Image (spheres, rainbow, N blue to C red):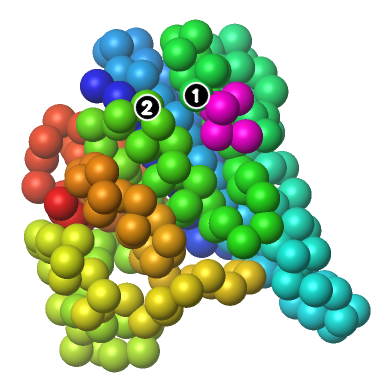
Amino acid sequence: MKILIRLGGSVIATPVNTGLIGKYVEILKELKAKGHKLVVVVGGGALAREFIQIAKELELEEKDQDDLAISVSRLFAQLFIKKLGKISCEKIPLSVEEAVECFEEGKIAVLGGLKPGMTTDTVAALIAERIDADMLIKATDQEGVYDKDPRKYPDAVKLDKLRFEELPQVLAEKKHRAGIRQILDPEAVKVLKAKRIKVLVLNGYKPENILLAVEGKNVGTLIE
């Protein structure tokens, strides 16, 4: 199975959770040993947003804010690459093409952001499109997709299944901005919807959820 795993910075990097990173590395090794082909896109979390804020205070343009956040996400990707060793490509892909090349070599491609104006969600979606992924798994700080933001509304209800056409009803942001925070970036949704790539949004604090998702178990929210 061809799998794109999008690891939210809110999970592994807010604050940095070395224990969780280690568990994810073991799960990636297990999935590869079972014959799955993998690409992992890592977010920068609170540290990335901290640098965005610093850039704002220095009155830097949004492009420069994005550049700093991308650098942070690549640091976290590098941690995974160092820990995975030779089963990864041992360098961070700096383009969709480099990620696909690594993937086609049978190694685990791990990367962060690519360029300003493009979130790591969109990076994940574009690569998933190129490799014709069987699924994209988004490991986040929530149990799945809710009918409204659970951080603001205690009565928010988790949805087990959604169609891409229904996502605009539950997503607040309609366009990219530096540091955007929601379950899926709107640009990523466009790509995934056009290709009808199955998406699973799940609780990333439980790395075993990745295994359950790959096994087809009922976990998180399924979007298709």
Q: Is residue 192 above or below residue 181?
A: above
Residue 164 numbered tag = none
Q: Position of residue 51 (x, y in %)?
A: 77, 67
Q: Position of residue 72 (x, y in %)?
A: 72, 52
- The answer to which of 217 and 99 lies nearer the viewer is 99
Label 1 crowd (10 A; few <14 / some 14-19 / many >=20): some
N-terminal-most mark, 2 or 1: 1
Q: Residue at x 40, y 46 (%)?
A: 125
Q: Is residue 188 above or below residue 215?
A: below
Q: Can residue 69 be found in the magenta stretch?
A: no
Q: Is residue 218 above or below residue 211?
A: below
Label 2 crowd (10 A; few <14 / some 14-19 / many >=20): some
Q: Quadrant of the N terminus?
A: top left
Q: Quadrant of residue 18?
A: top right
Mark 2 and mark 1 in contact? Answer it, CB < 8 Å.
yes
Q: Can residue 97 be found in the magenta stretch?
A: yes
Q: Is residue 36 left or right of residue 66?
A: left
- The answer to which of 16 and 80 lies nearer the viewer is 80
Q: Secondary structure at mark 2?
A: helix
* Residue 209 in view (yes/no): no
Q: Please, what is the three-letter code of the amino acid marked with disc 2?
A: Ile
Q: Which residues are magenta?
A: 95-99
Q: Residue at x 10, y 40 (%)?
A: 217
Q: Secondary structure at mark 1?
A: helix
Which residue reaches farthest right? 58
Q: Quadrant of residue 162?
A: bottom left
Q: Which residue is mark 1?
A: 100
Assign the magenta stretch its main secondary structure: helix
Q: Position of residue 222 (x, y in %)?
A: 16, 53
Q: Is residue 71 left or right of residue 59?
A: left
Q: Which residue is mark 2?
A: 131
